[in-house]
Image (tube, rainbow, N blue to C red):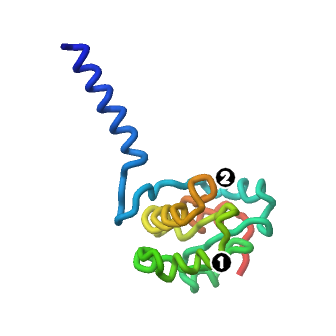
Amino acid sequence: MKGLKKILFLSTLVLMAVCGTSCNSSDGDEDLDAYIKLDAAAFKARIESAGGFDAVQILDYRSAADFAKGHLPNAINIEGTNQNAKDENGEFRTAVKNQFSTSKTIFVYGSKATNNTLGFYLSGIISKMGWGIAKTIHMTNGYESWVEAGYETVK
């Protein structure tokens, strides 16, 4: 009997671990955690290893006003919100589809203030739009962490 309880307990742990990474759902979308999260230094290193700013596609989802104050070189600004990203044919998703290619990695960043909620949600949406886990890279702690590290920005 002890052996059976142990097997059931271990099976439950395995099931919880699997569901914890692949069965979670938010806002009706599954697998919204399916992208790579990197800090500013690793994000910069990945851009450089991919050929630099001119060779990669970078999405800044902050407001146009914030983008105008400064952004990463070669970044394209498409303001993302929970509302405009929710609909499959909505403004955010349509703009991303029209301006970025799923054949290349997409580097995504926003603001530190919204990073843990909106940024993670948008990166998950983008991953599901065809980029997948390996080609969707999100910078944690937002644009502010890039600036704090002293990396190149443009206005």
- Left or right: residue 135 versus residue 129 is right
Q: Position of residue 97 (x, y in %)?
A: 59, 75
Q: Position of residue 24 (x, y in %)?
A: 36, 52
The numbered dot on residue 99 is 1
Label 1 secondary element: helix
Q: Is residue 7 above or below residue 141?
A: above
**Residue found 68% across the figure and 74% down from its top:** 75
Q: Is residue 19 above or below residue 138?
A: above
Q: In front: 140, or 22?
A: 22
The amino acid type found where label 2 is placed reads Ala
- Left or right: residue 129 versus residue 9 is right
Dividing the image into 4 quarters, which one contains the C terminus?
Answer: bottom right
Dividing the image into 4 quarters, which one contains the N terminus?
Answer: top left
The numbered dot on residue 42 is 2
Q: Residues within 10 Å of mark 1 (few under 14, many from 20)?
A: few
The amino acid type found where label 1 is placed reads Gln
